[in-house]
Image: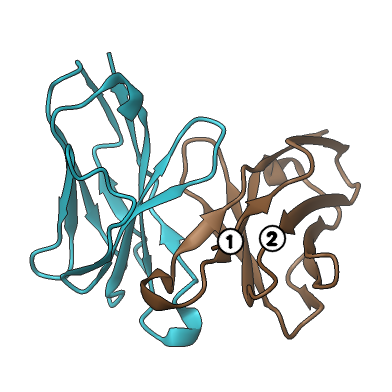
Chain colours: A cyan, B brown
Amino acid sequence: EAGVVQSPRYKIIEKKQPVAFWCNPISGHNTLYWYRQNLGQGPELLIRYENEEAVDDSQLPKDRFSAERLKGVDSTLKIQPAELGDSAVYLCASSPDHLDRSYEQYFGPGTRLTVT
Amino acid sequence: GESVGLHLPTLSVQEGDNSIINCAYSNSASDYFIWYKQESGKGPQFIIDIRSNMDKRQGQRVTVLLNKTVKHLSLQIAATQPGDSAVYFCAGPNAGGTSYGKLTFGQGTILTVHP
């Protein structure tokens, strides 16, 4: 079974530039998550999708961050404009639909963003 | 919501020893906990989970213990191997409503296994 796929793996940009990350979840997983992980910290949820609907985006800084999952499969997370403090690893995860397994999240390798 | 934390940020052990990684949580209503392993350059990998109606759950070389009285859980790794070197996170859910499925992660414990 293929895992969660993310691209790019690394991205270096200057501040004020836009950046986008892409994620393809495990086949059949309708729930998709975007997390941000700062150095030495655990992942923090940015947004959660059930199919194409964002059901929890309370932690997403909406002034500069946006996300979409138009067809309920792959997803894109965008930052515009990026700030120095956005440097982090951006992780995508997906989980099975069954209620008992919704916490069983499978993570991709992440995109390490460096803003200079 | 849930707050999870770890007692020690680092743990060093010799190969073959048993490792114990601890985690405390704040929400007594939390009913599910997960341990993740994160190797350098990779995303967290699911290791084992436990529900609040259990005190203990065993996997392959790993055991999770849950003490609901003191709101503490631990991950025990038997016969630790160099490949076990990683950061270990405990995670717990936020309860109810639109937060269902939202995990709160602790800070992580860095496990280093010396040959």
- Residue in front for this viewpoint, A49 or B45: A49
Q: Pinpoint the chain carrying mark 2.
A: B
Whichever of labels 1 and 2 marks the residue nearer the N terminus, that label is: 1
Q: Quadrant of residue A42?
A: top right
Left or right of residue A1: residue B12: right
Q: Is residue A65 above or below residue B100?
A: above
Q: Point out the image quarter for the C terminus of chain A.
A: top left
Which residue occupies 79% across, 52% down? B22
Which residue occupies 85% across, 41% down? B15
Q: Point out the image quarter for the N terminus of chain A.
A: bottom left
Which residue occupies 31% across, 29% down? A86
Name the residue carrying label 1: B2
Name the residue carrying label 2: B26
- Kindly state the secondary structure of the residue where label 1 is placed: loop
Left or right of residue B9: residue A97: left
> Same chain for the residues at labels 1 and 2, yes or no?
yes
Q: Position of residue B48 (x, y in %)?
A: 65, 68
Is label 1 in contact with label 2 (beta carbons under 8 Å)?
A: yes
- Residue in front for this viewpoint, A64 or A111: A64
